[in-house]
């Protein structure tokens, strides 16, 4: 788990530019002997045939990460950015970035005004992203352009992985390369199974951009059940204590309620049969199962639930993560391993008699 997670976290893959991440995932699928399909948007899908008389299940997670695109290159070679996704402006100054040009990746740094020249009225001020600029070492616009820096060029946080104590990892794009690593580990287990439902595994695109990149893959799979793997907000730090009970290292969890609440009237209230499935599976397997309910986040599962003639039974499953959308997010590897075990065991319980009724 650690090796695959580290590999994926070090690959830049801005929304709409996920090709390198997808290539790495396809290499692992080839190693497992699993056939895969990549659609026109870039979603990578695997079909694991199972009992056709039971519900069809789709499990997915997103490959992309938030970041920026180049908005303007100044005459002096400094680079202005447009934000892509929910980038926290208060976490940007002095961050390293990677400019992903067609000619190669270039490091840069988001400038932070020299402390010795910062006035008292500036010391506690957060600059909006439009006022920030990237210094990549160029002395002119011509130099930057010659190096491949053009308007629209993708820019990500500088990829990093830092080993912390107790089997914890900090780094870039834990959201959602951790989900990608879990899904690869699950694929390896499912490739050896002898029973269970038909399962579609999808590594999706553009979640951080518009939450809808997965829809072509979901249309192709036409699932009865959809499970989405993503972070759960860890609430075991002083700034998050009032938000819930999810703890890093406390094991996998499920979301009982999510709602965006910032202009997007959407979220997920999970199907009760899937909640019961995860609760019973965790109990029988001796696994912890944390519960999350919060406003302020949204996943692409919100849109999948409305697909098809009868809708899709949905549940968000996930792993605790600290410091979401910052350049260094934190995850506990043990939570990822237990999440893989939970999903594997839960899938084995979905048979022809699995009831998705609401009566």
Image: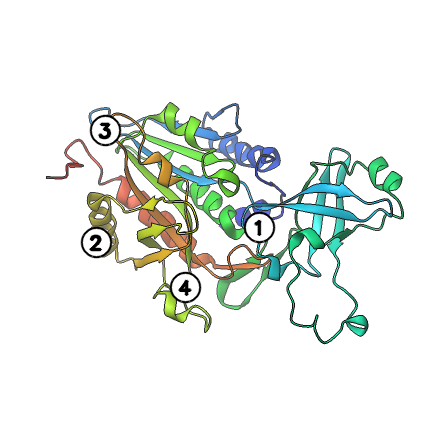
Q: Reading the chain from its start, which is encountered first: label 3 or label 4?
A: 4
Residue marked by disc 2: 284
Q: CA distance from mark 2 to mark 3?
A: 31 Å
Element on which disc 1 rests = helix
Q: CA distance from mark 1 to mark 3?
A: 40 Å
In the image, farthest residue toward the left:
359
| Mark 1 surroundings: few (<14), some (14-19) or many (≥20) residues within 10 A | many
Compared with residue 191, is residue 238 higher up or lower down, i.e. above or below? below
Element on which disc 4 rests = loop
Q: Reading the chain from its start, which is encountered first: label 1 or label 2?
A: 1
| Mark 2 surroundings: few (<14), some (14-19) or many (≥20) residues within 10 A | few
* Residue at the spot 36% in from the left edge and 41% down from the top edge: 302
Residue marked by disc 4: 249
- Tell me the mark number nearer the camera, choosing from 3 and 4: 3
Q: Reading the chain from its start, which is encountered first: label 1 or label 3?
A: 1
Q: CA distance from mark 4 to mark 1?
A: 18 Å
Query: Looking at the rendered structure, which numbered label has been put on residue 310?
Result: 3
Element on which disc 3 rests = loop
Specify whether 335 is left or right of 283: right
Q: Position of residue 225 (x, y in %)?
A: 28, 35
Residue marked by disc 1: 6
In the image, farthest residue toward the front:
121
* Residue at the spot 45% in from the left edge and 71% down from the top edge: 237
Compared with residue 177, is residue 125 higher up or lower down, i.e. above or below? below
Residue 277 visible somewhere in the drawing: yes
Specify whether 142 is left or right of 33: right
């Amino acid at each position: 788990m650690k090796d695959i997670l580290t590999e994926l976290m070090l690959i830049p893959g801005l929304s709409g530019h996920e090709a390198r991440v997808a290539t790495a995932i396809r290499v692992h699928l080839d190693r497992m002997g699993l056939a895969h399909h990549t659609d026109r948007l870039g979603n990578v899908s695997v079909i694991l045939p199972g009992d056709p008389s039971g519900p069809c299940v789709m499990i997915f997670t997103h490959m992309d990460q938030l970041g920026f695109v180049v908005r303007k290159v100044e005459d002096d070679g400094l680079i202005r950015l447009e934000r892509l996704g929910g980038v926290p402006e208060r976490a940007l100054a002095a961050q390293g970035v990677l400019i992903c040009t067609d000619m190669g990746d270039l490091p840069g740094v988001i400038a932070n005004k020299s402390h010795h020249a910062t006035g008292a009225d500036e010391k506690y001020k957060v600059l909006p992203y439009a006022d920030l600029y990237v210094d990549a070492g160029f002395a002119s616009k011509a130099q930057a352009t010659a190096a491949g820096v053009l308007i629209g060029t993708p820019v990500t946080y500088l990829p990093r992985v830092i080993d912390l104590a107790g089997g914890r990892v900090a780094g870039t794009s834990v959201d959602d390369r951790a989900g990608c690593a879990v899904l690869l580990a699950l694929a390896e287990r499912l490739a050896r199974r002898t029973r269970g439902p038909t399962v579609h595994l999808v590594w999706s695109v553009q979640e951080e951009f518009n939450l809808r990149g997965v829809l072509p893959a979901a249309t192709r799979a036409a699932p009865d059940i959809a499970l989405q793997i993503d972070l759960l907000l860890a609430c075991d730090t002083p700034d998050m204590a009032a938000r819930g009970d999810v703890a890093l290292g406390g094991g996998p969890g499920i979301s009982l309620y999510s709602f965006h609440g910032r202009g997007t009237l959407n979220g997920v209230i999970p199907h009760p049969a899937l909640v019961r499935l995860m609760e019973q599976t965790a109990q029988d397997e001796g696994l912890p199962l944390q519960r999350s309910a919060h406003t302020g986040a949204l996943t692409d599962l919100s849109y999948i639930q409305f697909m098809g003639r009868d809708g899709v039974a949905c549940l968000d499953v996930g792993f605790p993560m600290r410091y979401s959308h910052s350049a260094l997010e934190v995850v506990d590897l043990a939570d990822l391993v237990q999440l893989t075990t939970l999903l594997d065991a839960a899938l084995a319980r979905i048979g022809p008699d699995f009831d998705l009724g609401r009566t």
